[in-house]
């Protein structure tokens, strides 16, 4: 509390005592006055009680007289007796006593006198007592008000006495303490000034330094004595910075920003300066104060961060809460084709593909509602040139620096996954095409296990045999054929299994339908291996019932011939060329041409009504050959009810006994389905060719990336020898940055099931998924990465809840931190060799592949500390399972380990050469049985 004046402590005590005595005296007088008023109030209260009693008793007597009843004179007598004691105190009471006495005298003669005079006396008594009662009450109220005023004055006097005394006492105490406080404040300010972490420099109105704290001495290298009285201009490195500060002082009286300072030894540093002018109590400028801190390291980190952003291959951007872009790195501008000004401040919605926009908005609204820190989403974006590409974005919510529960925007790390997504889409389309072929073909297709239990059948199978989906699940195919055919089919399947043959075998079967009828089927049987012990049987069956019936009728009469032509789908006819009339047309005319046989009479009618205009010249040219006696065999198109059909027509001349052609027999067959299937296969062949080319480029890129990395790390090599042009093996050797901003090496060697084209496509997919995994925040180790890839593979290749594709990947995966000499490893089936001190340790991977497993367990993560001279080897099984040597046996892992020990002292380039020579010598004249990959990293 601020004290407006200060006086001597002794004088303050005397004044306090005098003021207290005065106010206490006033208070005592007021208290005595209150006591007197209380006595007076008591007397008036007593009078009021007596007057109430007189008034009540008089009124009762008056009422009794009016009613003619006996009055209660005792109450009035009692009031008179009490009143008699008060008569000497008040004249009004004396008058009242006389009136009561007069009434009492009249009352004693009440039986002898008239009542009316008595009632008159009582009325006067009642009115008089009422007047006295009101008067006494008024006096009592006045007395009470005076009492309250006296008490209030008394309390105020006492309060004023206490307050004035306390103020005077506190003033004397403050006076004695003020000097000590001033001294303490000065010392404290000095300690704060010199112990502050930031530099504090104070100058006078001429810009000469008057205060220079300890932090400033340490930062600038000057002592306090060296800078006192010198202009602060000498601390600036740049005149332009000094000019900015002075101009800001003149315009605003303050400055805040970054400047470049100079130390005593001439070195420079960047500081953040906050300065303002100082003024005295009269408002005149007295100098300036500047507070600054060294932000050189902070600026270096910011520059480093900007370099990372600018050199990153992924797109990095930030948006505010409205979705407007606030930053995008160079990679984003290059990949999307926009200029910086075309993106900053614009809504990110403009760059999202229209078909994906609603889903993307809903996804990120849900992220904000749930406050999910990090999410991953794949969607399409539009480039400036109109191209649409697939991207995968990791979106992180950016919390407010002042309130972590509130968010100020989103940071997105976006990777171009267009090639992977397009490859996935091609695989899905190809799968859909195959399924469509299976479902739309007229052939009966099913797969079953070795015991005959059905695993899958197409719609044609269920339609022809009239079984429902639920019934199919319980069917054993061997029960649908005779015992003899079942034994023949089992024997054929056993032969396929023992020979491990991929060839197809044919068999004729009579299969019972649900209604008991039999279908004659021509079946093709093959075995598909799912593993070393598991396999499935695939059967493609064609309904040959009608064909069998037709063959039985061959050689019979013309009626049998007609029966033949009407029993199959092909259109048979006999045509008289001279008359240009059809002498016979089979009933299939209705199915193929949409007309009853009797509606088609002449050949030119067929040309006019059905032939496709583009094929008309070819058709007419072929028909002319008939004049020369040649056969007619042509594929062409017809139009039936606005539908284009492909027809194969064969025409044969029929000669009479004289050798002259008098009739022509013809057969028309609808080959639309065959033509469409050929087109689908040609299209798929072209797509596969493109995929193969892409897979080849991917393998070339692996080798190019390895060469680039070897320039920085000469102690690394990969021996890569595919069995075929496209390999099921792949390797990754990349340099990357972990979440702690440390440089690490990703080294992986993988083997996808099979080899050649199918394995090559799978290796391409696994390669992409593995690189993608390290973009996810869920992946913290190699084991996590394998889990990530496994989940994606299962979601891609799962066709039904109980049906998986058994394609999988074996892999050795490790992350190497050269600075810390640390290694993390996780494997799926494949191990890691650690060669140390001329000994090899094998660190085994998990006994499960990356893909579908009957019993799934988490992959195990291993951590190793590396020593100088250690060598790490990752490899697929193609190296040590190769047949060769003198006895034609497998190389085996033990022989591989022994050889690695013999070359461990060589440098990487020589080791790779020796490894290649050793493998080639071991294989000799034997064929390579698998893809081969061996990777080495020397510490």
Image (tube, rainbow, N blue to C red):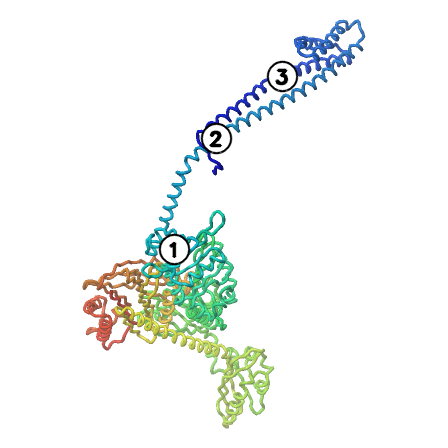
| Residue holding disc 3 | 40
Q: Which mark is residue 293?
A: 1
What is the CA distance from the residue labelled 2 to the residue labelled 3? 38 Å
Looking at the image, residue 402 lies above or below residue 649: above
What is the CA distance from the residue labelled 2 to the residue labelled 1? 49 Å
The location of residue 351, given as percent across then percent down, is: 50, 67
Which class describes the residues within 10 Å of circle 2: few (<14), some (14-19), or many (20+)? some
Which class describes the residues within 10 Å of circle 1: few (<14), some (14-19), or many (20+)? some
Q: Quadrant of residue 65?
A: top right
Between disc 2 and disc 3, the foreground one is: 2
Residue displayed at 58% across by 87% down: 604
Residue displayed at 52% across by 23% down: 24
In the image: residue 222, left or right of residue 562:
left
* Residue sitting nearer the eye, 264 or 875: 264
Between disc 2 and disc 1, the foreground one is: 2
Q: Earlier in the sequence, mark 2 or mark 3?
A: 3
């Amino acid at each position: 509390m601020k004290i407006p004046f200060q006086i001597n402590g002794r004088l303050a005590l005397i004044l306090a005592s005098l003021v207290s005595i005065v106010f206490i005296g006033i208070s005592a007088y007021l208290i005595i006055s209150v006591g007197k008023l209380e006595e007076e109030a008591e007397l008036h209260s007593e009078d009021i009680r007596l007057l109430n009693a007189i008034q009540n008793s008089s009124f009762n007597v008056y009422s009794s007289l009016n009613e003619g009843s006996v009055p209660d004179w005792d109450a009035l007598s009692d009031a008179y007796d009490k009143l008699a004691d008060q008569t000497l105190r008040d004249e009004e009471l004396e008058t009242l006593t006389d009136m009561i006495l007069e009434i009492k005298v009249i009352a004693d003669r009440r039986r002898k006198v008239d009542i009316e005079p008595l009632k008159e006396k009582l009325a006067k008594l009642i009115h008089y007592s009422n007047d006295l009662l009101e008067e006494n009450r008024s006096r009592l109220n006045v007395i009470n008000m005076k009492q309250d005023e006296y008490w209030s004055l008394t309390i105020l006097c006492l309060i004023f006495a206490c307050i004035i005394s306390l103020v005077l006492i506190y003033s004397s105490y403050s006076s004695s303490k003020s000097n000590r406080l001033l001294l303490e404040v000065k010392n404290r300010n000095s300690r704060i000034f010199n112990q502050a972490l930031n530099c504090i420099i104070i100058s006078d109105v001429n810009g000469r330094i008057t205060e220079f704290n300890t932090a400033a001495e340490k930062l600038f290298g000057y002592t306090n004595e060296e800078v006192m009285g010198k202009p602060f201009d000498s601390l600036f490195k740049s005149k332009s910075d000094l000019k900015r500060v002075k101009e800001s002082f003149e315009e605003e009286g303050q400055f805040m920003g970054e400047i470049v300072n100079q130390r005593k030894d001439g070195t420079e540093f960047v500081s953040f300066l906050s300065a303002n002018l100082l003024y005295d109590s009269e408002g005149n400028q007295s100098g300036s104060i500047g507070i600054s801190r060294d932000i050189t390291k902070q600026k270096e980190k910011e520059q480093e961060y900007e370099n990372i952003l600018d050199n990153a291959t992924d797109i990095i951007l930030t948006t505010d809460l409205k979705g407007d872009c606030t930053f995008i790195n160079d990679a984003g501008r290059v990949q999307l084709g926009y200029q910086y000004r075309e993106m900053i401040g614009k809504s990110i919605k403009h760059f999202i593909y229209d078909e994906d926009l609603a889903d993307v908005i809903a996804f990120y609204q849900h992220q904000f509602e749930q406050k999910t820190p990090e999410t991953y989403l794949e969607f399409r974006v539009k480039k400036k040139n109109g191209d649409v590409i697939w991207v995968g974005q990791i979106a992180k919510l950016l919390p407010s620096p002042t309130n972590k529960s509130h968010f100020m925007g989103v940071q997105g790390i976006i990777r171009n996954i267009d090639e992977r997504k397009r490859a996935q889409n091609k695989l899905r389309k190809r799968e859909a095409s195959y399924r469509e072929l299976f479902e739309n073909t007229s052939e009966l297709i099913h797969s079953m296990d070795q015991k005959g239990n059905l695993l899958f059948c197409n719609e044609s199978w269920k339609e022809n045999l009239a079984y429902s989906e639920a019934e199919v699940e319980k069917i054993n195919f061997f029960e649908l054929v005779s015992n003899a055919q079942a034994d023949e089919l089992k024997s054929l399947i056993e032969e396929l299994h023992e020979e491990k043959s991929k060839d197809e075998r044919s068999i004729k079967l009579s299969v019972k339908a649900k209604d008991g009828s039999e279908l004659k089927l021509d079946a093709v049987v093959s075995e598909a291996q799912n593993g070393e012990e598991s396999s499935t049987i695939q059967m493609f069956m064609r309904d040959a019932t009608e064909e069998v019936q037709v063959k039985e009728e061959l050689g019979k009469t013309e009626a049998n011939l007609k029966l033949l032509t009407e029993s199959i789908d092909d259109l048979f006819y006999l045509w008289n060329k001279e008359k240009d009339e059809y002498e016979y047309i089979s009933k299939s005319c209705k199915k193929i041409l949409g007309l009853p046989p009797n509606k088609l009479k002449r050949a030119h009618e067929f040309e006019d009504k059905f032939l496709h205009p583009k094929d008309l010249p070819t058709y007419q040219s072929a028909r002319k050959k008939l004049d020369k006696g040649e056969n007619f065999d042509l594929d062409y198109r017809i139009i039936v009810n606005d539908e284009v059909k492909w027809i194969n027509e064969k025409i044969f001349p029929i000669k009479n006994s004289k050798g002259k052609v008098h009739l022509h027999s013809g057969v028309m067959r609808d080959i639309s389905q065959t033509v469409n299937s050929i087109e689908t296969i040609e299209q798929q062949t072209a797509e596969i060719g493109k995929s193969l080319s892409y897979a080849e480029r991917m393998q070339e890129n692996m080798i190019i990336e390895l060469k680039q990395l070897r320039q920085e790390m000469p102690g690394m090599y990969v021996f890569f020898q595919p069995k075929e042009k496209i390999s099921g093996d792949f390797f990754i050797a990349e340099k990357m940055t972990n979440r702690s901003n440390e440089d690490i090496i990703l080294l992986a060697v993988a083997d996808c099931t099979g080899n050649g084209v199918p394995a090559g496509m799978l290796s391409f997919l696994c390669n992409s998924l593995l690189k993608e995994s390290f973009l996810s925040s869920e992946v913290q180790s190699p084991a996590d990465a394998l889990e990530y890839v496994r989940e994606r593979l299962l979601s891609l290749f799962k066709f039904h809840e109980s049906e998986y594709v058994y394609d999988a990947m074996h892999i050795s995966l490790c992350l190497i931190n050269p600075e810390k000499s640390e290694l993390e490893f996780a494997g799926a089936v494949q191990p890691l060799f650690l060669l140390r001190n001329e000994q090899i340790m094998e660190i085994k991977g998990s006994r499960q592949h990356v893909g579908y497993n009957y019993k799934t367990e988490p992959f195990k993560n291993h951590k190793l500390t590396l020593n100088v001279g250690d060598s790490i080897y990752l490899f697929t099984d193609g190296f040590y399972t190769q047949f060769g040597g003198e006895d034609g046996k497998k190389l085996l892992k033990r022989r591989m380990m022994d050889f690695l020990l013999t070359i461990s002292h060589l440098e990487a380039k020589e080791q790779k050469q020796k490894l290649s020579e050793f493998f080639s010598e071991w294989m000799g004249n034997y064929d390579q049985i698998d893809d081969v990959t061996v990777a080495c990293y020397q510490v």
